[in-house]
Amino acid sequence: MPYVVYILECVDKSLYTGATNNLEKRLHEHNTAKRGAHYTKIRRPAVLKYFEKFNSLAKARKREAEIKSWRREKKLELANV
């Protein structure tokens, strides 16, 4: 099952990084569902700016943690925003 690490840009121009095995469903949750991440729930809409695919959850989570540790500028460079 493929896993995805993604970067969203929220309406306030802040960035959110996450990981999932169903990107379409997760984007829907971020933008409409009550169960979406609180961070994006109060900053809707969130727009997908970047994603990477991985073969394992462990690799995806490792990459997610790496990206989350970066400064905003480096995330924007990765996403080419």
Image: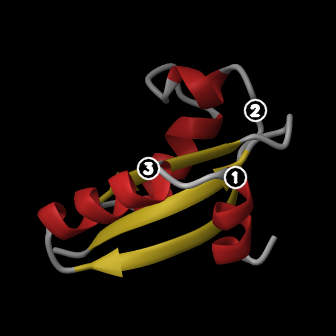
Residue at 74%, 60% in the rendered image: 73
Label whose residue precedes the other's in the sequence (2 or 3): 3
- Bin the neighbour count of mark 2 within 10 Å (Cα to Cα): few under 14, some 14-19, many 20 and up: some
Label whose residue precedes the other's in the sequence (1 or 2): 2
Q: For numbered disc 3, what is the local secondary structure?
A: strand
Label ID, residue 18: 3
Nearest to the eye among marks 2 and 3: give it.
3
- Bin the neighbour count of mark 1 within 10 Å (Cα to Cα): few under 14, some 14-19, many 20 and up: few
Residue at 47%, 49% in the rendered image: 68
x%, y% of residue 80?
Answer: 76, 78
Give the quarter of the figure containing the N terminus: bottom left
Residue at 54%, 55% in the rendered image: 70
Dot 1 amino acid type: Arg
Nearest to the eye among marks 1 and 2: give it.
1
Is 47 or 79 nearer to us in this picture? 79
Label ID, residue 41: none
Dot 3 amino acid type: Gly
Q: For numbered disc 1, what is the local secondary structure?
A: helix
Give the quarter of the figure containing the C terminus: bottom right
Residue at 13%, 62% in the rendered image: 58
The residue under label 1 is: 72
Q: Is residue 35 above or below residue 72?
A: above
The residue under label 2 is: 44
Q: Is residue 37 above or below residue 7?
A: above
